[in-house]
């Protein structure tokens, strides 16, 4: 990717940036075709087209030849295979999953937008390893179109001084579902004709951001705090309230001082880390941070400043990295950690010994990511470096015993990079993997013999034989790193990868 263009003469980065884009589709069942114009990793497709030096982010232009995103609606796959037989003039699509087959040297994925209710793609100047969705005051259960969302992301620039924390507003996100009925009522035209609008504000930082998380209390308190773990080992606390306000207040500006962190946690002593989580119980601000040497620090905001416990929580095997931290959603003093030693440790911050209360061996490889269920307080999901993931019932955790997971899957063959429970549906989980997929799973599904037989009749090619019944949908995205559900827009997800970010909603959820 070419270097981002930014005016070094400006002392303040306070003007919102706007750009528009044409909607792009994704696919469920793909057909393979020769790739005429392959986009390289992290290549900046618009590097020489900007006239303004202040434009740093742009939504991607409509380019069918470079559309690499794929969705797979597994329930619909058999039906579409039958439908293709009725239309012999079209090339019959074939199901593609990286777990079952591989693309040829000159093959690429052709997207099918009919399985997405919405799909938009954003090109960023630099790869983004981590992001988080900002809660807003636009209301919950927002099902109508167009949609608006806010989020914050940290970059991985080629030069340290070009890194930044970026606060972004996306609006006019239209419905992008391509209906099979061409005579659909014209009432839906308003949902599909508008182009998305992007506005952004940047806060300079000197290092790559490994992980960034937003305080869950932001919308209620009116104070939008974000914590970022940098490659340098420092943890920065950012107040992005002025940036959020400026999006929706004409004439509002952001000062240079407001672009700086309000606090820096240096307790990790320059040791890199990847794990951070805000307490959902302490509105004023309390967070955990972990590093690659196995140390976990607790930082709490007081009346005038932040305080970090000098004594860290230590319990993972010597030399094991703390890869993930998750506060309990129901117990104020309880949190869980996942480490490169393959263990999940459960802690109580009230313990003076700062040792784990319970430990279980979850995997023979690293525990990369975890997610605590928002609806069932005793369920914890974990994703592992060997491509497996599982759901754990903490009621079965007992000292000296090794419980079995309540559910486990090994369908992915590459490391799990993110896992997250649906915010309201207790059985649905989003899982991203280094195999370039984001998969949606419904753990409540159990296929009976009749359903399996019917599927085989529809799927004469046998493409679905090895796909678990619980797999609902697959979204293809290059080098995907993180995925998050939008807690206020039912079914909407955002994911980040090597070629930018995706905002999408499947027809399956």
Image (cartoon, rainbow, N blue to C red):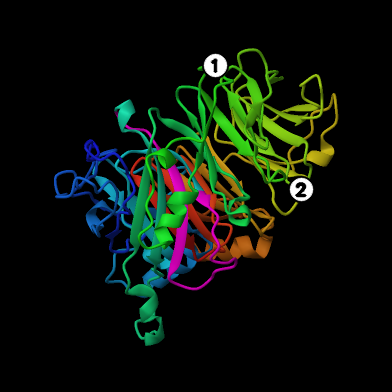
Which SS class for mark 2? loop
Q: Which residue is mark 2?
A: 377
Residue 257 colored in magenta in the image: no
x and y, in percent, of residue 300 in the image: 67, 33
For the C terminus, the quadrant is bottom right
Residue occupying the point 65% across, 12% down: 318
x and y, in percent, of residue 267 in the image: 59, 20
x and y, in percent, of residue 308 in the image: 65, 26
Residue occupying the point 35% across, 33% down: 163
Q: Residue 508's image quarter?
A: bottom right
> In this rendering, which labeled residue sits more in front, label 2 or label 1?
1
1 or 397: nearer the viewer: 1
For the N terminus, the quadrant is top left
The answer to whether any part of residue 133 appears in the image is yes
Residue 148 colored in magenta in the image: yes
Q: Residue 269 shows which numbered tag?
A: 1
Measured in 3D between alpha carbons, the distance from the residue under mark 2 to the one under mark 1, in whole angstroms, is 34 Å
Q: Earlier in the sequence, mark 2 or mark 1?
A: 1
Question: Which stretch is magenta?
Answer: 133-158
**Is residue 388 rendered to the left or right of residue 498?**
right
x and y, in percent, of residue 196 in the image: 34, 64
């Amino acid at each position: 990717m070419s270097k981002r263009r930014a005016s070094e003469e400006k002392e303040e980065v306070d003007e919102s940036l706007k750009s528009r884009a044409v909607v792009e589709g994704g696919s469920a069942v793909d057909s393979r075709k020769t790739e005429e114009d392959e986009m390289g990793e992290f290549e900046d497709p618009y590097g020489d087209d900007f006239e303004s030096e202040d434009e740093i982010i742009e939504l991607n232009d409509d380019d069918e030849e470079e559309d690499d995103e794929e969705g797979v609606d597994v329930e619909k796959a058999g039906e579409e295979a039958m439908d293709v037989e009725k239309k012999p003039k079209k090339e019959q699509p074939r199901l593609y999953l990286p777990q079952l087959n591989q693309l040829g040297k000159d093959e690429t994925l052709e997207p099918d937008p009919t399985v997405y209710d919405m799909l938009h793609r954003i090109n960023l100047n630099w790869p983004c390893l981590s992001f988080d969705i900002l809660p807003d005051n636009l209301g919950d259960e927002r099902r109508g179109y167009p949609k608006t969302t806010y989020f914050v992301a940290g970059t991985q620039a080629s030069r340290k001084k070009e890194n930044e924390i970026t606060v972004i507003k996306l609006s006019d996100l239209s419905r992008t579902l391509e209906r099979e009925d061409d005579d659909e009522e014209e009432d839906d035209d308003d949902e599909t004709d508008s182009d998305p609008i992007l506005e952004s504000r940047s806060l300079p930082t000197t290092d790559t951001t490994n992980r960034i998380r937003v305080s869950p209390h932001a919308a209620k308190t009116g104070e939008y705090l974000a914590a970022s773990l940098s490659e340098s080992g420092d943890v920065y606390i950012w107040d992005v309230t002025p940036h959020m306000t400026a999006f929706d207040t004409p004439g509002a500006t952001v000062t240079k001082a407001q672009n700086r962190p309000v606090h820096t946690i240096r307790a990790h002593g320059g040791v890199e880390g990847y794990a951070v989580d805000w307490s959902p119980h302490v509105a004023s601000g309390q967070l955990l941070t972990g590093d690659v040497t196995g140390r976990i620090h607790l930082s709490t905001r007081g009346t005038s400043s932040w305080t970090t416990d000098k004594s860290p929580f230590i319990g993972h095997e010597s030399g094991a990295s703390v890869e993930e931290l998750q506060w309990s959603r129901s117990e104020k003093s309880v949190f869980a950690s996942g480490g490169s030693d393959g263990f999940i440790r459960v802690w109580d911050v009230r313990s003076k010994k700062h040792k784990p209360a319970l430990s279980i061996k979850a995997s023979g490889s690293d525990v990369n990511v975890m997610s605590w269920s928002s609806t069932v307080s005793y369920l914890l999901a974990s994703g592992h470096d060997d491509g497996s993931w599982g759901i754990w019932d903490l009621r079965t955790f007992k000292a000296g015993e090794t419980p079995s997971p309540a559910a486990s899957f090994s369908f992915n063959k590459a490391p799990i990079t993110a896992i997250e429970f649906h915010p309201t549906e207790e059985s649905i989980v989003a899982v991203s993997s280094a195999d370039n997929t984001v998969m949606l799973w419904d753990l409540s599904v159990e296929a009976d013999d009749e359903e399996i037989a019917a599927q085989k009749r529809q799927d004469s090619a046998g493409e679905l034989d090895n796909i678990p019944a619980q797999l609902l949908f697959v979204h293809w995205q290059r080098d995907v790193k993180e995925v998050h559900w939008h807690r206020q827009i039912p079914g909407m997800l955002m994911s980040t990868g090597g070629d930018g970010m995706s905002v999408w909603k499947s027809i399956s959820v």
